[in-house]
Amino acid sequence: MVIKRLGWMVLAAALLTAACGDDGPARDPEGNITDTGAASVFSFRTGDCFDDPASDAAEVEELSAVPCSQPHDNEIYHTFDMPDGEFPGTEAIFDVAYEECLGDVFTGYVGITFEESELDVFPVTPTETSWGAGDRTVYCAVFNLDLSKITGSVRGTAR
């Protein structure tokens, strides 16, 4: 399977201030995104859907949050934190991220193994700049292999 490795996905904004304040998307009482709109990259959670950014910037501070019931490009299916310490390097972070994102968490969320799936994944990872500001979170996101829009959540779909 092809892995979506767009430059903008090696993200997680350079400014920790982007993580402060209420820059999250509008949500219903269950926590589901209710309105399409720009939201801080730090405000996304497992189960959230979003569109690809308009630019190919190496670092992105905001993404377009989309209710999963509407057509969207990506869905976050898992998040985890890298261990503290010195920045291990982009390649090392990607190695850890892909190992985590392609394992049991994919199967548990989608309902079949990555190898059986018609979906593909990419990790949204800390950059060296954001790491220096304390960012350790990796977001595992899923998208259609043919890059078509997804409508609805992929959770439990066995796609």
Image (spheres, rainbow, N blue to C red):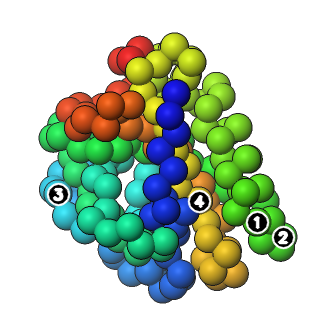
Answer with mark 4 or mark 1, whichever residue precedes in sequence: 1
Find the distance from the CA under tag 4 to the CA under tag 1: 11 Å
Q: Residues within 10 Å of mark 4 (few under 14, many from 20)?
A: many
Q: SS of the residue at dot 1?
A: loop
Circles 3 and 1 in contact, beta carbons < 8 Å:
no
Residue 143 location in percent, x, y? Answer: 38, 37
The residue that label 4 is drawn on is 125
Question: The C terminus lies in which quarter of the figure?
Answer: top left
The answer to which quarter of the image holds residue 128 is bottom right
Answer with mark 3 or mark 1, whichever residue precedes in sequence: 3
- Classify 81 as above or below 103: below
Residue 149 location in percent, x, y? Answer: 23, 37
The residue that label 2 is drawn on is 85
Find the distance from the CA under tag 2 to the CA under tag 3: 36 Å
Q: Residues within 10 Å of mark 3 (few under 14, many from 20)?
A: some
Residue 30 location in percent, x, y? Answer: 29, 44
Residue 13 location in percent, x, y? Answer: 49, 75
Answer with mark 3 or mark 4, whichever residue precedes in sequence: 3
Circles 3 and 4 in contact, beta carbons < 8 Å:
no
- Name the residue nearer the viewer: 136 or 56: 56
The residue that label 3 is drawn on is 36
What type is the residue that disc 1 sits on? Gly
Q: Residue at x 69, y 81 (%)?
A: 132
Whether residue 152 sits left or right of residue 15 in the image: it is left
Find the distance from the CA under tag 3 to the CA under tag 4: 23 Å
